[in-house]
Image (cartoon, grey):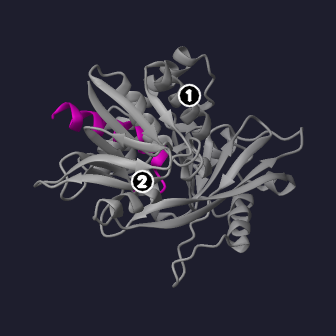
Amino acid sequence: MKQVAIVGCGIVGATIAYELSQIPGFQITVIDRQPPAQASTGAALGVLMGNISQKKPKSRAWRLRHASMQRYATLIPELEARTGRQIPYNHHGILKLCFEADEIAKWKKWIELRHSQGLKLEWLAIEALKKRYPQIESTQLVGAVYSPDDGQVDPVLLTQALVEAATLAGVTFHFDATVTGAKIAASSPQVCQSIETTRGEFPADEFIVAAGLGSMPFASALNQTITVKPVLGQALHLRLPETSRLPQPVVTGEDIHIVPLGETECWVGATVEFPDAAGEVVADEAQLQAVLDGAVAFCPMLSSAKILRQWSGLRPRPQGQAAPIIGYLEGYRNVLLATGHYRNGVLLAPATAGEICRMLGDR
């Protein structure tokens, strides 16, 4: 059995662990300094913008998105059957609002392109938009694009289901284990023999780093550098009066998402807050208020909503290369990186896991 150690148990690490557990020949251990889905996964909205994204068909970004959406179609029911858990998944699609007249022609071309790929997108002119979703109101709107096959999933509950299903398949999890060092064999390329943690030493044949911002100290222990910067996102959980009825697709406009949780509750977010000159990121209440105001501007019923909860989290944004980082750590032949997903960790987790499985399968 090939020993595999995965560092990080957010949505990406948990998905890799589960997918690898379905392949014979791997004995898998997952290590994290905290319980699953506590970092950027716990702050994510789980919006799955696949078909509706304006990514070119031959690009890496599209390939990863498309692969993830295809796998999500089977992964969710598979996990529910194996764990008995219900994983909240919004099957009502995504409604993307358009505010500029010059967007109409561009979107109609993208709709034709997606149709040529066998994928569904629909243009809704103002009259059709108002008739189908009367809750959406704005004099600035010129129309909307509806994607019935995109959606949204609860990131925390999905991660927990992945951990349970992976455990049932024989994966071992060690939480509250902080990486403190590593043993390296002198060779070219180098080989990581084991990692040292506060819970003991873990030897392995292959190491997978899926720790988001925590990937940097791990790389440092291996005398390498990964530059991943924190970008903070804030979001809100709202409840409307019982007489209100939210539109059921995820509604997105001006980079603001309204994620329905039934007919009277929703998540709204998220801010995009970069570090200051000193490298610090502090949640800005004004930016969160601006996101809420923006959501109210195209869905006025939210003005009467009660705020049940607000939260924030840091997303890992790579510097000097495209997100995400998937591949071997420079100088090492047995350390794989699956990190730096920025705002698309939930969306790209299945595709990332697929890439890692293929890389290990080729060895």
In this view of the protein, which residue sits in the foreground, 231 or 1?
1
* N-terminal-most mark, 1 or 2: 1
Residue 122 can be seen, yes or no: no
In this view of the protein, which residue sits in the foreground, 104 or 318?
318
* Pointer 1 residue: 161
- Specify the amino acid type for callout 1: Ala
Asked if residue 361 lies in the magenta stretch, the reply is yes
**The magenta segment:** 340-363
Q: Percent position (x, y) of residue 79?
A: 51, 22
> Dividing the image into 4 quarters, which one contains the N terminus?
top left
* Pointer 2 residue: 341
Extreme residue in the front direction: 200
Q: How many marks?
A: 2
- Specify the amino acid type for callout 2: His
What is the secondary structure assignment of the residue under circle 1? helix
- Residue displayed at 45% across by 49% down: 197
- Residue displayed at 21% across by 59% down: 330
> Image check: 258 left or right of 175?
right
